[in-house]
């Protein structure tokens, strides 16, 4: 079976490697254009492009595949390339570009997507972040046949995965990426033997995982400690949460909700700041607080609280602002 692959970040690169290692012929890889990244804002190739180049797989980077969009000539060239590339199926994983019906119809077996949630929960751009942020206990991978709607296609395979209390988006991403790679190999092997039964997604339980914005990263201590602890895990490693103390932005990378005696402290007030207790912050409700255990000051490194406090003065009574 010949497989065109479309994907961009590390999540997709894991699946591409799994297909390559399994011996599938990959005549073409589609990935998003190189982007500036890092402090020097140098142009940076996607994880998928890097893997493809290392293994001499041809790469195309159209900025659009929509014939009716802003770049019809570029989209037309991409369609021509796909039509001229012999392949049976296109596998798509976190590509980041819309595949219009005209592109979906090119492969003989259509386009198959690796999605990081148990559909129909968390359709959309950020399923891993939103699952942790919302307190889900379980997530998983859905392999689905793509259609025009956003993650609405029939399901070819589904496997669940528990979300540990210690998982952040980084650790859960790695688990799901590995599972997605294993599953897509199995699904394509089955497709080689004949058509796979597909299950229509249920109409109940649909939720949307909106793209993460940097504006969401500011912590509001008017929320409960439990909600904030989940958000910190969900936004680690990107974009990272933060709050302001005395006009200085402090990034908060790890924290936990702890029960405390009832307090009249205002939300965001520092209740304790020492190596033993960590940094304890009052939150909504008054019966629980947020214990900060890994922090970062501007221009500094991520540090455990015992190493952070000697270089950042913090005393009980001070108040973090949103």
Image (cartoon, rainbow, N blue to C red):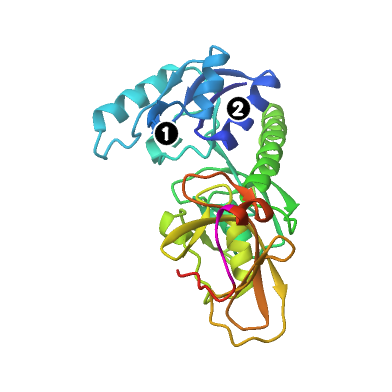
Helix, strand or loop for the magenta stretch, by majority? loop
Residue 54, how many percent across, how many down?
56, 15
Q: Nearer the viewer, residue 75 or 305?
A: 305
The image shows residue 258, relative to residue 159, as above or below, that is below
For marks 1 and 2, give the one nearer the viewer: 1
The reply to whether the C-beta atoms of the residues labelled 1 and 2 are less than 8 Å apart is no
Residue 272, how many percent across, how many down?
65, 71
Give the mark count: 2
Mark number for residue 16? 2
Magenta-drawn segment: 311-315
**Residue 121 visible in the displayed image:** no
Quarter of the picture holding the N terminus = top right
Residue 129, how many percent across, how many down?
57, 54
The verdict on residue 313 being magenta is yes
The image shows residue 260, relative to residue 300, as above or below, that is below
The image shows residue 168, relative to residue 205, as above or below, that is above
Mark number for residue 141? none
The verdict on residue 216 being magenta is no
What residue is drawn where x is 63% and y is 63%? 230
Q: Which residue is mark 1?
A: 37
Quarter of the picture holding the C terminus = bottom left
Q: Residues within 10 Å of mark 2 (few under 14, many from 20)?
A: many
Q: Residue 80 appears in which quarter of the rendering?
A: top left
């Amino acid at each position: 079976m010949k497989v065109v692959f479309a994907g961009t970040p590390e999540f997709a690169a894991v699946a591409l490697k799994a297909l390559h290692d399994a011996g599938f012929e990959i005549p073409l890889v589609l990935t998003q254009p190189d982007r500036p990244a890092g402090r020097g804002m140098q142009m940076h190739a996607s994880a998928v492009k890097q893997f493809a180049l290392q293994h001499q797989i041809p790469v195309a980077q159209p900025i659009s595949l929509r014939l009716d969009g802003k770049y019809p000539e570029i989209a037309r060239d991409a369609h021509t390339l796909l039509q001229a590339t012999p392949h049976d199926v296109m596998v798509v994983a976190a590509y980041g570009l819309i595949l219009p019906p005209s592109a979906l119809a090119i492969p003989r077996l259509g386009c198959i997507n690796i999605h990081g949630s148990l559909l129909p929960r968390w359709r959309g751009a950020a399923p891993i972040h939103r699952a942790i942020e919302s307190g889900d206990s379980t997530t998983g991978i859905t392999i689905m046949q793509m259609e025009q709607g956003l993650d609405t296609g029939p399901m070819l395979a589904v496997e669940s995965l528990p979300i540990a209390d210690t998982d952040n988006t980084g650790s859960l991403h790695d688990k799901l990426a590995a599972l997605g790679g294993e599953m897509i190999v199995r699904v394509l092997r089955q497709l080689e033997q004949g058509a796979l039964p597909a299950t229509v997604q249920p109409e109940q339980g649909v939720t949307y995982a909106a793209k993460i914005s940097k504006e969401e990263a500011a912590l509001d201590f008017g929320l409960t400690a439990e909600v904030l602890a989940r958000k910190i895990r969900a936004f680690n490693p990107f974009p990272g949460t933060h709050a302001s103390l005395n006009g200085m932005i402090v990034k908060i990378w790890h924290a936990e909700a702890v029960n405390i005696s009832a307090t009249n402290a205002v939300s965001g007030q520092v209740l304790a700041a020492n190596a033993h207790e960590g940094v304890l912050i009052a939150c909504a409700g008054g019966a629980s607080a947020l214990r900060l255990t890994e922090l970062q000051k501007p221009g500094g490194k991520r540090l455990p609280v015992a190493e952070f406090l000697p270089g950042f003065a913090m005393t009980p009574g001070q108040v973090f602002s949103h």
